[in-house]
Image (spheres, grey):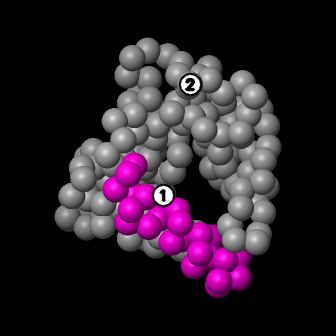
Amino acid sequence: MSTTLRRAVAEDAQTLSALGARTFTETFAHLYPPEDLAAFLAYAYGLERTQRDLADPDKASWILEKDGTAIGYALAGPCDLPHPDVQADHGELKRIYVLKDHQGGGNGSRLLNTVLDWLEKDGPRPLWIGVWSENFGAQRLYGRMGFTKVGEYFFPVGQVRDLEFILRRG
C-alpha cells in the first residue's frame, strides 16, 4: 500500500473539512457533551472555514493519503496563540492529526517534519504549538524536537474549557 503526502489545494476543502471533524471526534469526543462537540465541529472544521484557510496565502495544509484515501492532515501558518511574546513573523503548527488506524509507522512524524520544514523555509524563526495538557505523547514528541512549554491558556469547546500548553522552539 502506498502512502503519499502532498500540499492541499482548494479542491481538497471538502476532504479536509470532513477529515478534520473525523479526527477531532476520534481523538477528543469523549471529553465533551454532544451539543458542545457539534457546535465546535461546525465552527472549527466547517467547509467555509476550511476554504478560507486554503485560500490564505500565509497558511498551508497538507494531506496524508494511503491508496488515495485521506488518513491525516496538518495546517500551519502565522501564530495566533495567546502569548505576549508572539510576533507577526512567528509560525505555528495549528493542527496535525492522523486517523488512529494509521498512527505509527512514521506517518505523523513525516507529516510533522514536512510542516516544520515549510514553516522555516525562509530560515529559522520562532515556532509555536498549542497542545492539550493531557496529551502526554505529543508533548514528549514536541519536546524531542526542541519545543518547550512557555505558557498555558484555556481552549473553548462549547462550554468546556480545556487547559492547553503553549510550546515554543526558537
State the residue at coordinates (39%, 58%): 50
Mark-to-mark CA distance, 1 and 2: 25 Å
Is any atom of residue 74 visible in this view? yes
Where is residue 23? Give x, y as percent: 48, 68
Where is residue 8? Give x, y as percent: 28, 49
Q: Is residue 5 left or right of residue 75?
A: left
Where is residue 19? Give x, y as percent: 39, 67
Q: Residues within 10 Å of mark 1 (few under 14, many from 20)?
A: many
Helix, strand or loop under label 1: strand
Q: Residues within 10 Å of mark 2 (few under 14, many from 20)?
A: few
Q: What amino acid is labelled 2 in the image?
A: Ala
Examine the residues drawn in magenta and state their main secondary structure: helix
Going from N to C along the chain, the mark reached first, 1 or 2, is 2
Give, as a single range, the part of the protein colored magenta: 28-53
* Residue 15 within the magenta-colored segment of the rendering: no
Looking at this view, name the residue that lies furthest to the bottom.
Answer: 34
Q: Nearer the viewer, residue 76 or 70?
A: 76
Is any atom of residue 1 visible in this view? no
Total number of numbered labels?
2
State the residue at coordinates (36%, 41%): 56
Q: Which quadrant is the N terminus positioned in?
A: bottom left
Residue at the spot of label 1: 97
Height in image: 20 above or below 166?
below
Residue at the spot of label 2: 88
Q: Nearer the viewer, mark 1 or mark 2?
A: 2
Mark identifier at residue 124:
none
Height in image: 48 above or below 151?
below
State the residue at coordinates (39%, 49%): 53
Give residue 99's quadrant in the image: bottom left
* Residue 32 within the magenta-colored segment of the rendering: yes
Give residue 159's quadrant in the image: bottom right
Q: Which quadrant is the C terminus positioned in?
A: top right
